[in-house]
Image (cartoon, rainbow, N blue to C red):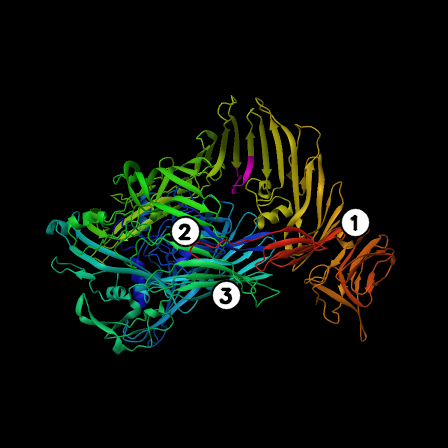
Amino acid sequence: MKKYIALLLQLLSIQVALAQLPKSYVSFSSPAAAAMTLYNEMPVSKYNGTVGIKVPLYTLKENKKELPLFLSYNTSGVRPDQHPGPVGMNWSLVSGGSVTRIVKGLPDEDGFNFTRILPDISGNNTATYSIASGYVYNTNKLNNSSWNTTANITAIASNISLDYSKGNGFSEAEPDEYNFNIPGYSGKFFINADGTIRVQSNPNIKVNIYTTIQNDSATVSYNGFFSSRDYIFSQHVIISGMDITVEDGTKFIFGYVPGVSDNTALDAMEQSIDFFQQYYVGCTVNTWNISKMILPQNDTVNFYYYHNPYPIASFSRAISYQYSQTTNTSGGFLGWLFGSTGDTYKNFNTNQCRGHLIAPSYLATIVTDNTTIAFSYSRSNELTYDYNQIYNSLLYQGGSSFDPSIGTTNGYSNNPINIPPFAYKESSGRVMNLGARQWMYDYSLQQQQQTPYYDPTNSSVLKYVEPLSFDLLRWYKLDTIAVYTNASPNIPYKYFKFDYNNVPTERLKLLSVREGNSNFQELPPYRFIYDSSYTLPPYLSYNVDHWGFFSNKNSYISSFDATTLSNYYNLRQPDSLYLKAGMLSTIQYPGGGTSTFVYEPHTYNQVRYRDESTGNFYLQTESGYAGGLRIKQITFNAGAGTTPVTTNYTYESGILNGKARYYWPAYNSVTNQGRQYSIATFISESLMPGTSNNAGSYIGYSKVTEAVSGNGKKISYFSDLGTNPDQNFDNTLDQQKSVYLPFSEKSLERGSLLREEVYAQNNSLLEVDSLVYTTSNPSLVNLYAPAVESKQIVLSGFYGVNEFGIEGTAYRNYLYPYDLVAKIKTVYPPAGSGANPVTTSEQMTYGQGAYNLLVNHLAIDSKGNRRNVIVRYPQDYLPVNGTSTGYNILDTMITKHIINATVESVDSLYYSGQTTGVVTGAAVNLFKLGSLNTIVADKQYKLEITSPINNFQPLSVNAGINKDSRYNQVVGFDNYDVKGNILQFEKNYDATHSYMWDYNSTYPIAEVINAAQSDVAYTSFEADNTGTWFFLSGINGINVTDSTAPTGTKCYWIGAQGRLLYYLYKTNLNSGVTYTVSYWSKSGQYSISGSSNVKTGRSLNGWTYYEHLVSGVTEVDISGTGYIDEVRLYPSNAQMITYTYQPLKGITSKCDEKNQISYYNYDAFGRLKQIKDQDGKVLKFYDYQYQVPVTQ
């Protein structure tokens, strides 16, 4: 029963906090997932001083889509308390994508069902309780025009009841933030108050979220409310998965989506739980890794994960202090009777740890129809936490202190680090968890090994801390990535091996990456060298600055007088000397070249502050260092005999997003009982203003100069907090407005390039680009998701009493797109030429209705002539407020979210000074349903005019397509295979083109000009298809390996074996067409039905070329005895070009229309080495030389 009661108390106290304390909006995800969130939040940009350091590994290709796998390094600095992920400190493996969540308040889907059974009670002994507390159950409180009124905010903040039998409980109205990263896209989305899911700045992306019920546990209490057994079975709602669909219809599945995913996708979710509340609370899902990518033609890429039995953890250190005092002012009769003296209470903690347990997902394989990529891990031997510090926190040793000298009323110590419930027993009773995962409790140890101690608030109560097995916390490192083909599933086509320092005294660092081949030969490695000037501190160190970077200053304090607390800020100031410790300084490439990186600390000359009376922001001139690093210089040296290229970066006009605040000497407000309260508080956590709104980078530069040695310089100007400030909240109940009070941030507008100047080496101006941004789609202007952050401040000494402070703030999560709408380019002539600068410009307009695609592009030349291009998409043909275009294929495209396919584009010309223009050209693309209900191109039309016209009729839809009569079809796409590969198309005034595909429909093996697809056949016996020939398995099987085969490496045997006859045949031919049948043979010419003329060609390596003319037949048979290869059939007036491949490498042979063969040879690592003709003459040669690094 305790867990039930504790969970209810948790819901009551979820917002137990000081008013406007820095709120830790943190996604407790594995280091790998957290790195991807940072990769999204801190994009590579000169605006924030970051640079893109990537190590390419492999690119998976599937039906015109590419999925790159690469390593990415975070150059912003090393934070000592951020645990490295599986590829080492500051590195992340980008291998598909993920969605991570920042929980604001409670999880959006937070909801519980409880079933309580009293088996010792007769009659109706079962009761069910439901608690719907998350944001998704309360959107109605925001989906109205009064969402930001004082009355509504008060109602939300006061929405609490102890009557859980009615299903009431704490509920909140603040949506969580979801960050996603997928190939080609990154961003964030919110669940809006109207129930829709909105992607910030990109309404063209569609998101769906799916929930499921998760069983938490069953508990049995022998010491509950009744002197009997008390069974509690609990369940809670979790978001199991989601899908994200981009503009071309490609769908990305994350986690588990019912009806799409199998149960293996459950392993793609990462769950976390408060380390110190494992017994009382359930797990929260904060990361959903990609589990499937579905392409528009229904090809799929599957991602499989696994959870090993061992969790990981994330811990942080904090010092806290709180002094509360209430008065009886405005307290009615009691206030008059007793005066203004109320209750006081003091609580402090000098050795506090906070942490979360995390069940990380490890990517195991990526699987397509042709390729499998496997990931292998092993336990790392890296530096770990000092678990004694964590254990001491559990035992309150050196921790919280109860101060009886002040005197308390209705109070007791309510330290946030309670006795960990997973390790909790009372001497008078026992609570058993029958179902929940007890991640850290070692069941093999017995009670006699438990540590006894007395409750600090009641010395008569004896409690125990269970023995903890910290060895159950295990971090793993990625050892290898291996790429396999279906043709060779046991021997890797190539692999990548990762080497680390892997010692228990250091954080995990990636030292090198080596590429190997199927023969287990390895190329020279990428090597990584790190700054070793200073040694990083251990985890949970006090030697960190405001932003959590290494400062080598001990910020520990043990006294809490006003002077010490006021001076604490200086103990957390950054030190530029130590910021570079552990940073990547050099990359040595496999080719022998190097890149060297020089960093410097961030500097600022303005700081954003907030007026505490109004909440408005203002900038104040102030200079100093900020934590973290920016790139100063990059030097690339290609190797011996080359001149190094150095790029230098200089930064100006840095604006700091805000300064941390740790100590509030007095905060005054009123409780819900009308009493005034005052709080003095201190907390040492590194939380910066603005991070509670997740506003991205904490510093930005409006002017950055990039100078390349010997090649001039480029000066870039960016939007920043000065040009694009944040917006204050809509409304608040709070009397004092601190820097941590929520606001409506507009970071989506900052970091945009506003102007760029290009200078020659002699400093003469060459070019200036000026750019303008705004929201051009009127339907999306000022789009936002409303939010109300609410708190019920349980005052120290009043926990469990129905008196609390109420706080609430209404603010906006802005979602509108911020588009480039204008660009002006001025090109300057060489100095002294006497010529004038040439200026051109562009204007862009986006979207109609709910989408935001480019619909109008206007280009203005230096003479003032304007060329305008109008583009229309499927959704542009929907009627106002309508749901159907009236044309089925367009409706299907909209349903499948294929919204970026151009239906019509129209070019117009406006001569300088004229307001009306003429149409100079136009094109229409029509679509149709292909195999498996996919969308494929049908026909393309072009406007056929001899001069510009002014009476053009744009395409319209009315139960069909209505287009201008001057449109003429230029191409028709006749046939496709099941994977959407084109099989036949016809161009206007041109011959029919046909294609054949093989290797699991991945590669084109034949291209035929002037022939229908039904009139051609081809095979070289290399892969899985027969090229529309029919034949049985020969005496040695279909694919007979022969290194002398004219094309590829395989051929076919025809002849008699017992009563069986093996031959090739092709049916359904046109008897009125004369066909060419050609082949290479090792045994002379073969018999072909309908053959009237045979040509014998050249011989090659024991093979001879034969060519037959066949006519007057509907079937062709090829029979005889011997080996045959490169068998072609096509109309005699057509031309055929054929290809063979080695999957993942590329073309191995090409036989042209004259049957001249070219061979493509690759080295052991899959790189093209040479191209030869059929006589062995080398046409092209590629040499890959590797220089040896100096340190090797």
Query: For the residue labelled by badge 2, is the local secondary structure a helix, a strand or a loop?
Result: strand
**Residue 520, how many percent across, how many down?**
54, 65
Whether residue 678 can be seen here: no
**Neighbours of disc 3 within 10 Å: few (<14), some (14-19), many (20+):** some
Kind of residue sitting beneath label 2: Thr
Q: CA distance from mark 3 to mark 1?
A: 51 Å
Q: Which of 252/953 is in front? A: 252
Determine whether the residue tagged by mark 3 lies in a helix, strand or loop: helix
Q: Looking at the rendering, which quadrant does residue 1081 occupy? A: bottom right
Residues in magenta, as a range: 846-856
**Does residue 836 sit above or below 792 in this rendering?**
above
Mark 3 or 1, nearer chain start: 3
Q: Percent position (x, y) of residue 14?
A: 31, 57
Neighbours of disc 2 within 10 Å: few (<14), some (14-19), many (20+): some
Mark 1 residue crowding within 10 angstroms, few (<14) / some (14–19) / many (20+): some
Residue 1137 percent location from the top left of the image: 73, 52
Residue nearest the viewer, comparing 204 with 212: 204
Chief secondary structure of the magenta portion: loop
Classify residue 1184 as left or right of residue 635: right
Q: Nearer the viewer, mark 3 or mark 1?
A: 1
Q: Which mark is residue 1134?
A: 1
Q: Looking at the image, do the residues carrying marks 3 and 1 touch, with CB atoms under 8 Å apart?
A: no
Q: Which residue is mark 3?
A: 264
Q: Which residue is mark 2?
A: 586
Marks 1 and 2, the one that precedes in the sequence: 2
Measure the C-alpha gap from mark 1 to mark 2: 57 Å
| Relative horizontal placement of residue 995, taking residue 1107 as reference (left or right) | left
